[in-house]
Amino acid sequence: MFKYNSDFLVVMNKSKLEKTITKELKGIELLFNQDLRTFSTIRLGGIADCVAKPKSLEEIQALLTLCSDKDIPYYVIAKGSDVILGNTDGVLIDVTRLSRVLNVGGLEPGENAKRKILAMEEGKIVGMEVEAGTHLRKLSRFAQDYGLSGLEFAVGIPGTIGGAAVMNAAVVANSTGDILDYVITVSPDGSVIRLSKEDLRFGYRNSTLQDGYSGYVVYSVGLALKRKDVSEVRRRTDFCLDARKHQPKGNSIGSFWIRRNYKPFKDRKDDHLYIDDIIGMPPLNCRGWSSENGLVYIPDNYYAVSFFIVREGATIWDLAQIAKKVYDAVRDKYDGLRLEIEGKFLGLTNKGRPLGKVFYGVLTDKYPLQEVKEELTIPLKQAA
Ligand SMILES: Cc1cc2nc3c(=O)[nH]c(=O)nc-3n(C[C@H](O)[C@H](O)[C@H](O)COP(=O)(O)OP(=O)(O)OC[C@H]3O[C@@H](n4cnc5c(N)ncnc54)[C@H](O)[C@@H]3O)c2cc1C
């Protein structure tokens, strides 16, 4: 989620930005000139002029109103488990301080609410509203304790419920869109807007929060869960967590490419191949491939061939190199098939161009690799 006006960004200079933000946004936790590598699970990133960590709906409103009045660009991040970050001129809004369960079944969370909900008949639909930065693992276990089913699948996804709503995070056939009822958002001009499930038009790893409502910050998410036996919910949650054991350790955004069945050959009727077969099996078999310096690599594991694992010292340039190698190899071996990227790019390169545009441009040969080496080398911009 980001908001800027054109391919090239002109914002007020850093010291003016710092003065304006500090003066106008009293009480909000602010960090200036931040190295962003620890803000995403893939541990790549540029420098943020300013990171703001709101703790309430009102603080988000104050932030967006200021950004709108002063024409300051902003980006939103949660756990950073599906983003690749460049430089962020303007404000990076980190929502992970917003992590409270606001209500369960219309009640304030606590022993009293738990007792009442556990006394409800099985099968009853119970609403729950949580702040967007709540971690999915914590939330799944919370729901389990209240005998509420629907979030079991999310226990092993290393993101937040807000990020999951934006991305329609899913595991096999269970997706966030299935259990979501509404979201409370703040629009770019600072207004509070409730969006329904229908407004969000969930698709595969997609929702309108990525385009139509781009620039809206999700404050909270309303879920519709089903009352079930606690031990049954626990069993299912444990099972879902256990199923993640095969996933490789290391810094990544999980699957880099969208994982789905592809039809790799235009003129053959029969073959729909799963992405793991295309990348991880002969004739291609990219398992173990790496960037030239070995700092970004594909694990030698069939179930993780769509991951790129990043070692310390790697740059976005290294990621671009290996991603291009895989993208080109698939296109050449499989009749022009184009892999699609799942993760989101936020921020700018050293030349002030949107990181995503340049990265996609590298894959599609719009920007030759050698030409963008400087732009994609980290630290993209030296911290002062
Ligand atoms: C090891 C690993 C395994 C993974 N497995 C899965 C999986 O099985 N299934 C799956 O679907 N995904 C998976 N992912 C990807 C990722 O965890 C999910 O997409 C997750 O939902 C992202 O949540 P996040 O809080 O980290 O969001 P971020 O990565 O911080 O943000 C993702 C996008 O949402 C926007 N955003 C986040 N919060 C808000 C908000 N409050 N308001 C407005 N915009 C917001 C950001 O701007 C960005 O565009 C995996 C990732 C890793 C690292």
Image (cartoon, grey):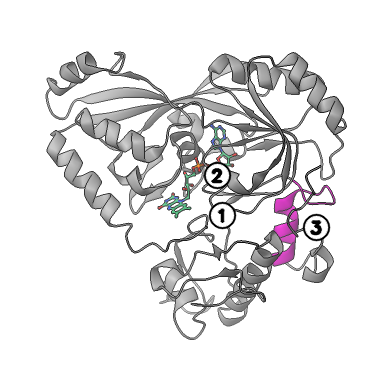
Q: Secondary structure at mark 2?
A: loop
Q: Position of residue 24 (x, y in %)?
A: 74, 14
Judge left or right: residue 146 versus residue 205.
left
Circle on res. 101: none
360 or 348, which is in the foreground? Answer: 348
Judge left or right: residue 213 versus residue 118.
right
Question: Pointer 2 and pointer 1: residues touching (CB < 8 Å)?
Answer: yes
Residue 218 to residue 383: above or below: above
For marks 1 and 3, the one nearer the N-term is 1
Circle on res. 375: 3
Amino acid beneath label 3:
Glu
- Screen quadrant of the N terminus: top right
Identify the residue at image location x=33%, y=57%: 244
Magenta range:
348-363
Q: Position of residue 302 (x, y in %)?
A: 40, 73
Q: Is mark 2 within 8 Å of ligand 1?
A: yes
Q: Please name the residue that numbered disc 2 is placed on.
A: 80
Residue 359 part of the magenta segment: yes
Q: CA distance from mark 2 to mark 1?
A: 8 Å
Q: CA distance from mark 1 to mark 3?
A: 18 Å
20 or 152, which is in the foreground? Answer: 20
For marks 2 and 1, the one nearer the N-term is 1
Within 10 Å of the Cα at label 3, are there few (<14), some (14-19), or many (20+) other Cα atoms?
Answer: many
Residue 138 part of the magenta segment: no
Judge left or right: residue 171 versus residue 160.
left
Within 10 Å of the Cα at label 1, are there few (<14), some (14-19), or many (20+) other Cα atoms?
Answer: many
Q: Secondary structure at mark 3?
A: loop
Q: Image quadrant of residue 384?
A: top right
Q: Image quadrant of residue 369?
A: bottom right
Q: Is mark 1 within 8 Å of ligand 1?
A: yes
